Amino acid sequence: MAEEEEPKPPPLRRKSSANYRGYAVEPHAKRQSKISASRKLQLKTLLLQRAKRDLEREEQERAGEKQRHLGELCPPPELDGLGVAQLQELCRELHARIGRVDEERYDMGTRVSKNMAEMEELRLRVAGGRFVRPALRRVRLSADAMMAALLGSKHRVGTDLRAGLRQVRKDEAEKESREVGDWRKNVDALSGMEGRKKKFEAPGGGQS
């Protein structure tokens, strides 16, 4: 029986792009992972549990360090056998200490805020050098263009600021002023007092 010939490997594939000159890609079989999916999940779970325990231990150590530091700064006062004057003196001392701590806290907060502002300014300077800022120019906008820029697609109709105002002509305004100025004559004419008023206004009027 004749021996079977071994299969020849496939030829190398070359990319025809100009960016890859003579770049050869050899065919390779898909690698299979040596760890199963269940084993990967188990290892990931163990790592997460260990990280959780480490975080809990760090939190406990931090809380213990905080309590120890507070105990050193503010030891519990000894109140046994103290009189009224001694208690008052102790209260004044505690109030003074609280004031000093408050001042230190305020100064520390001010320094932190100043440092944060400086860091933000430096960050903006660094980021500002990466981009080219366009030259800004002043543009005059009409009322319609301004409303369209603010409202977007909602603004479609032209804005007339004088649409809601009442239009009054010059002759109508003069007529209204005359009518308003002659209201006494109209009242006298309607009440029948116009003739009597003239009689009393005449010289020697009203004397029999």
Image (tube, rainbow, N blue to C red):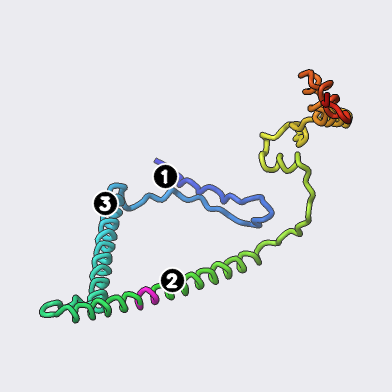
Q: Are marks 3 and 2 in contact (CB under 8 Å)?
A: no
Q: Position of residue 91 (x, y in %)?
A: 24, 76
Q: Position of residue 178 (x, y in %)?
A: 85, 29
* In-front residue for pair 183/208: 208
Tell me which label, 3 or 1, sits earlier in the chain.
1
Q: Residue at x 55, y 71 (%)?
A: 118
* Stretch of the chain drawn in magenta: 100-104
Q: Are marks 2 and 1 in contact (CB under 8 Å)?
A: no
Which residue is under mark 3?
Answer: 42
Given the image, on which type of amino acid does mark 2 rest? Answer: Gly
Local SS, label 3: helix
Foreground mark, 3 or 1, reads 3
Local SS, label 2: helix
The answer to whether 205 is drawn above or below residue 139 in the figure is above
Given the image, on which type of amino acid does mark 1 rest? Answer: Glu
Find out whether residue 109 is within the magenta segment.
no
Which residue is under mark 1?
Answer: 3
Tell me which label, 3 or 2, sits earlier in the chain.
3
Counting other residues with Cα less than 10 Å from the Cα at mark 3, is it few (<14), some (14-19), or many (20 or more)? Answer: few
Q: Quadrant of residue 160?
A: top right
Q: Position of residue 173 (x, y in %)?
A: 84, 31
The numbered disc on residue 109 is 2
The numbered disc on residue 47 is none
Given the image, on which type of amino acid does mark 3 rest? Answer: Gln
